[in-house]
Image: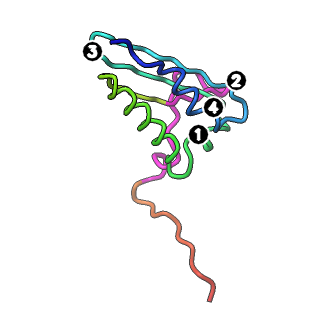
Amino acid sequence: MDSPDFPGLVRFLVEPFLDSPDSLRIDCEENPVQAKVWIRIAFKGDERGKVFGRGGRNIQAIRTIVRATAALSGWSAYVDVYGASESDSGSDRRPSAASQRSPGKPKPQLRPKP
């Protein structure tokens, strides 16, 4: 069975979040023997927040759609996001803000005014 158009699907899902869609780079590595696909996406670093969304909701939804599409075709899919700003190398992954926070440090809480 042929694999779905994974790069086209990812482009369709990610481009609406980008101010400069031309910066989007998609690398798709398929292994037809194991029916697995690895998709790596990169874009300008300053657009990371838009693609990831609050709490990572956008990127999680994109990953869910790609995995579900792959599963319907008998494939398994993995989506990774890489930094693509000029100061970063294309293969370096930058940790998210949540992973940079120390585990022992509590999140600041807002207090209501009296």
User: Mark 2 falls on what kind of element?
Assistant: helix
**In contact (CB < 8 Å): disc 1 and disc 3:** no
Kind of residue at badge 4 = Glu
Q: State the residue position of label 4.
A: 15
User: Mark 1 falls on what kind of element?
Assistant: helix
Residue 62 versus residue 40 in the image, above or below: below
- The Cα atoms of the two marked residues, 1 and 3, are separated by 29 Å
Judge left or right: residue 65 versus residue 34: right
Which residue is drawn at the image coordinates 48% and 37% (left, top)? Answer: 62
Kind of residue at badge 3 = Gln
**Residue 72: where, in percent of width, then height?**
33, 28
Kind of residue at badge 1 = Val
Kind of residue at badge 2 = Asp
Q: Which residues are magenta?
A: 81-102
Indicate which disc, 4 or 3, sits on the residue closer to the N terminus: 4
User: Mark 3 falls on what kind of element?
Assistant: loop
Q: State the residue position of label 2.
A: 22
Q: Which colour scheme appears in the figure?
A: rainbow
Residue 25 versus residue 111 in the image, above or below: above
Quadrant holding the C terminus: bottom right
Q: State the residue position of label 1.
A: 51
- The Cα atoms of the two marked residues, 4 and 3, are separated by 29 Å
Q: State the residue position of label 3.
A: 34
Indicate which disc, 2 or 1, sits on the residue closer to the N terminus: 2
Which residue is drawn at the image coordinates 72% and 35% (left, top)? Answer: 19
Which SS does the magenta portion mostly show? loop
Front: mark 1 or 4: 4
Q: Is residue 90 found inside the magenta-colored segment of the image?
A: yes
Give the image quarter of residue 70.
Answer: top left
Indicate which disc, 1 or 3, sits on the residue closer to the N terminus: 3
- The Cα atoms of the two marked residues, 2 and 1, are separated by 14 Å
Local crowd at mark 3 within 10 Å, few (<14), some, or many (≥20)?
few
